[in-house]
Amino acid sequence: MIHCSGQVIQATLSFLRAAGEQNSECVVLWLGRPGREGTSVVECYRPHQLARADRFQIPVQGMDMLRAKLRSERLMVAAQVHSHPQDAFHSKADDAWAIVRHEGALSLVVPRFARDTFPENFLAQTKVYRFSNAATWDEVPGERWVQECLRII
């Protein structure tokens, strides 16, 4: 279970919208610390990335910067959140460039470059995918991901 504040969601949507205004996808990483009740997100982090309207990629330099931050602040990537220009789904490019790839990892996709997504409707509009032990990204139905994956605090 990931515990995330409304402020982190708002910051996430701001990053996604800003990129969308440039007709570009964007990926944001929720960084956190594990605990007994799940992982608490402490920061919304926009890594150095190359992006366009239909994909994002974090180049080697961006990955190096991310790893250094995670080490120095003793954090982990709790989830990745990214935008799509239209519908929310996990594309082949998303599969290929996913940052988190451990069993149970979460990838959240926000539609329409987050133009009409706000903290109040984030749960209703966002699609959630979980990485399986078969190395596939499987959609978690809305009624289940709210119970199993994400709690807004």
Image: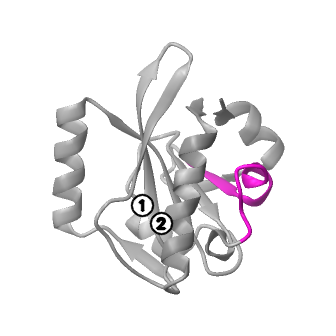
Residue at image x 24%, y 51%? 66
Q: Is residue 57 magenta?
A: no
Q: On the picture, is 135 further left or further right than 64?
A: right
Q: Which mark is residue 21?
A: none
The quadrant of the rendering that contains the C terminus is top right
Q: Position of residue 29 (x, y in %)?
A: 42, 51
The quadrant of the rendering that contains the N terminus is top right
Instruction: Give whichever of 141, 52 is nearer the camera.
Output: 52
The three-letter code of the residue at mark 1 reads Ala
Q: Read off the residue under disc 2.
A: 95
Asked whether the residues under the numbered discs 2 and 1 touch, taking CB atoms below 8 Å apart as contact, a structural biologist would say yes
Instruction: Give whichever of 10, 99 is nearer the camera.
Output: 10
**Whether residue 8 is situated above or below residue 93 in the rendered picture:** above
**Whether residue 68 is situated above or below residue 64 in the rendered picture:** above
Residue furthest top as drawn: 36
Residue at image x 50%, y 28%? 40
Span of residues in magenta:
116-131
Q: Position of residue 96 (x, y in %)?
A: 41, 69
Q: Is residue 136 visible?
A: no
Q: Read off the residue under disc 1.
A: 98
Mark 1 crowdedness (10 Å alpha carbons): few <14, some 14-19, many ≥20: many
Q: On the picture, is 103 further left or further right than 142?
A: left
**Cα distance in 3D space between marks 2 and 1:** 6 Å
Circle 1: element type: loop
